Image (cartoon, rainbow, N blue to C red):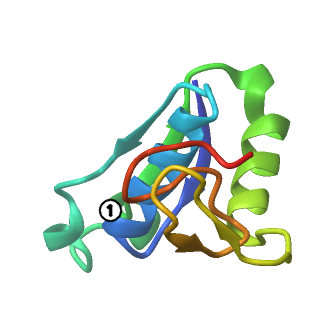
Amino acid sequence: MKLLLRSTSLVHAAHCENVLRAAGIRAEVRNTWLGGAAGDIPFQESAPQVWILDDAAEADAWAVLNAAANPPPGPRWQCTGCAEWHEAQFASCWRCGAHRE
């Protein structure tokens, strides 16, 4: 296992875990309950942490997180299933679940 990142927010750490898992990278969040101990123990030890289970996946994990944080610009698209409009970074329709063509 390898520590990938520490976050100031449990929400951010959980989001990173979800993004990694969606990309097929096994990850987990640790220190979910230590926020109340901040000040009594060092921040590095109490902050939420995202760990990856496979050390060799570190480069891929950072690439996935960077891609999620910086989506490619592009035109909006319309779902062929329900005609809902979406921004370019979305690969499937939030309303009906159809994949972007």
Q: Quadrant of residue 73?
A: bottom right
Residue sitting at 52 percent across and 65 percent down?
83
Question: Looking at the picture, does residue 92 appear above or below residue 12?
Answer: above
Side of 99 relative to 74 (left or right): left
* Disc 1 element: helix
Q: Residue 94, image x and y in percent?
A: 42, 58
Can residue 9 be seen in this snapshot?
yes
Instruction: In this rendered view, identify the residue nearer to me: 68 or 60.
Output: 68
Q: Residue 36, image x and y in percent?
A: 14, 71
Tag 1: amino acid:
Ser
Residue sitting at 38 percent across and 64 percent down?
47
Count of numbered labels shown in the rendering = 1
Residue highlighted by disc 1: 46
Q: Residue 34, image x and y in percent?
A: 21, 59
Can residue 42 be seen in this snapshot?
no
Q: Residue 52, image x and y in percent?
A: 58, 31
Instruction: In this rendered view, identify the residue nearer to me: 43 or 75.
Output: 75
For label 1, count other residues whose C-alpha is less than 10 Å away and answer few (under 14), some (14-19) or many (20+): many
Say which quadrant the C terminus sits in. top right
Q: In which quarter of the image is residue 28?
A: top left
Residue sitting at 21 percent across and 73 percent down?
40
Question: Looking at the picture, does residue 20 appear above or below residue 71?
Answer: above
Instruction: In this rendered view, identify the residue nearer to me: 47 or 13.
Output: 13
Q: In which quarter of the image is residue 12?
A: bottom left
Residue sitting at 34 percent across and 67 percent down?
11
